[in-house]
Image (cartoon, rainbow, N blue to C red):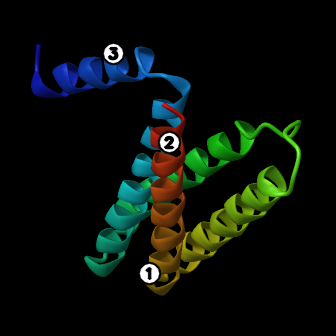
Amino acid sequence: MGYENVKKSYLKNQVMSASPNKLIEMLYQGAIKSVKIAGIAIENDNPKKAHKELVRAQDILMELKGSLNTEVGGDVPENLESLYEFMYQQLVKANMNKDQTLLPPVVKMLTELLDAWMQITTETN
């Protein structure tokens, strides 16, 4: 079994055994990683890699958006949905124009959401 197969198997096991809270954390981490890699790919004039990573981050944002519990009261789900949509649109623009200047604000927002998520899940456990 090659390294890539071992890595895929490990990741699959990690996802399959993760709690819902841990899955959200992993999604945020994956999106941050993909956006950062895309920025590096744009810098290095590698549009295919940038496209792949930006689409991956867009897919993660749509997964996060789809996981929102809109039955919870208050403005939080609606505000998160707006944030996810805004970040998604920024990634689409960055991908179309290979404009890395749009990426740092998205990384910052995702990092802040991850930090908040981790704080919330730590307090509730």
Q: CA distance from mark 3 to mark 1?
A: 33 Å
Q: Is residue 48 above or below residue 24?
A: below
Sequence-first tag of 2 and 3: 3
* Tag nearer the camera, 1 or 2: 2
Q: From the image, tell me which residue sits under label 2.
A: 123
Q: Residues within 10 Å of mark 2 (few under 14, many from 20)?
A: few
Which residue is located at x 50 percent, y 65 percent? 112
Foreground of the two, 15 or 54: 15
Q: Amino acid at mark 2?
A: Glu
Residue 10: percent from left, percent from top? 25, 21
* Tag nearer the camera, 2 or 3: 2
Is residue 98 among the parts visible in the rendering?
Answer: no
Apparent side of residue 82 relative to residue 119 in the rendered image (left or right): right
Mark on residue 13?
Answer: 3
Q: Secondary structure at mark 3?
A: helix
Q: Is residue 81 above or below residue 25?
A: below
Q: Are marks 1 and 2 in contact (CB under 8 Å)?
A: no
